[in-house]
Amino acid sequence: MQGVAVPTLFAAGIVPGILAGVALMVPTLWLARRHGWGGGGGEERLDLWRCLREASWGLLAPVVVLGGMRSGLFTPTEAAVIAAAYGLAVGMFVYRTLDLRTLWQAVSEAAEVSAVVMIIVALVAVFAHAGSAIGSFEAVAHALVSMSANDTVAILLIVAFLLVAGMFLDAISIYLVFVPVFAPVAKAFGWDLVWFGVVMTMCLAIGQFTPPMAVNLMVTARVGNISMESTVRWVLPLVASMAVAVLSVVFFPDLALWVPRTFGFR
């Protein structure tokens, strides 16, 4: 959307991201204590600190990316290259989990994923052009606005829609198809587009681990060699807790807007 800078969106996602992390930690801690997973003595705590030290190179990646963009060293597009180069260097020379063979596999898989995304982008571009040309997006926006003059009801309807859509579609497709639909609605109600982008992202993040088409659950089920159906009852508390985090950002926009305003991203 025009007028929304990528660094501003990154900055706006910091507090909601922390909130989402805490929201996922709470039910995880409850499940761990209920079923007796971990919670032992000092050895486990030492392992935690060792894991944090080992993960420090990975945790440094967002600092490099955001710091470089904020300082003007590189643009958001160039940041993608920097992040890939940083990950390659860490994987090959620090963790040494990448060799030439695994690097080739990673590049091949990335090419396949990128090709799929590019096909989606191309088709959605045609859809977006057609929708704009015939005025269907504006018609949908007017219909949503006419359903309720209350902006709170409107944003809750959009959140509900995104939660359901995220259960069946991948996030990239939803962004490309529905951002042109929802942007006029956001402007009609006078919503901050940065805040709306954060809300939309959090809603779609929930969809990535909500059955039946939960991409993240598919990956974790494959890694754990279990069926995705067996994970459903375990993931429901996480979905509920994450939904609370989304509603918190919906009703308190400053959670997303405080960092950009305070540190000059606006």
Image: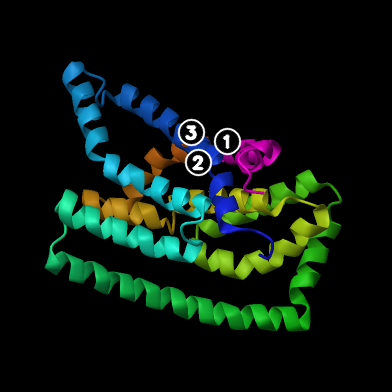
Specify the principal SS of the magenta part.
helix
- Does the CB distance between marks 1 and 3 fall below 8 Å? yes
Left or right of 167 in this view: 199? right
Residue at 53% x, 50% y is 10
Residue at 62% x, 44% y is 260
Q: Tell me the CA gap for discs 1 and 3.
A: 8 Å
Q: What is the number of callouts on the image?
A: 3
Q: Residue 58's spot in the image, x, y percent?
A: 30, 46
**Disc sitting over residue 244 in the figure:** 1
Q: Residue 243's spot in the image, x, y percent?
A: 56, 40
The reply to whether the magenta stretch includes residue 254 is yes
Helix, strand or loop under label 2: helix
Hey, what amino acid is under mark 2?
Gly
Which one is nearer the viewer's eye here, 14 or 188?
14
Q: Quadrant of the N terminus?
A: bottom right
Helix, strand or loop under label 1: helix
The residue labelled by disc 3 is 23
Query: For the magenta stretch, what is the residue range?
Result: 242-266
Q: Tell me the CA gap for discs 1 and 2.
A: 13 Å
Q: Tell me the CA gap for discs 2 and 3.
A: 10 Å
Which one is nearer the viewer's eye here, 17 or 173?
17
Residue furthest to the top: 41
The residue labelled by disc 2 is 17
Choose the circle earlier in sequence order: 1 or 3: 3
Helix, strand or loop under label 3: helix
Residue at 24% x, 34% y is 53
Q: Kindly indicate the quadrant of the structure image that contains residue 105.
A: bottom left
Residue at 47% x, 66% y is 77
- Frontmost of labels 1 and 2 is 2
Choose the circle earlier in sequence order: 1 or 2: 2
Left or right of 244 in this view: 2? right
Q: Is residue 170 at least partly visible in the picture? A: no
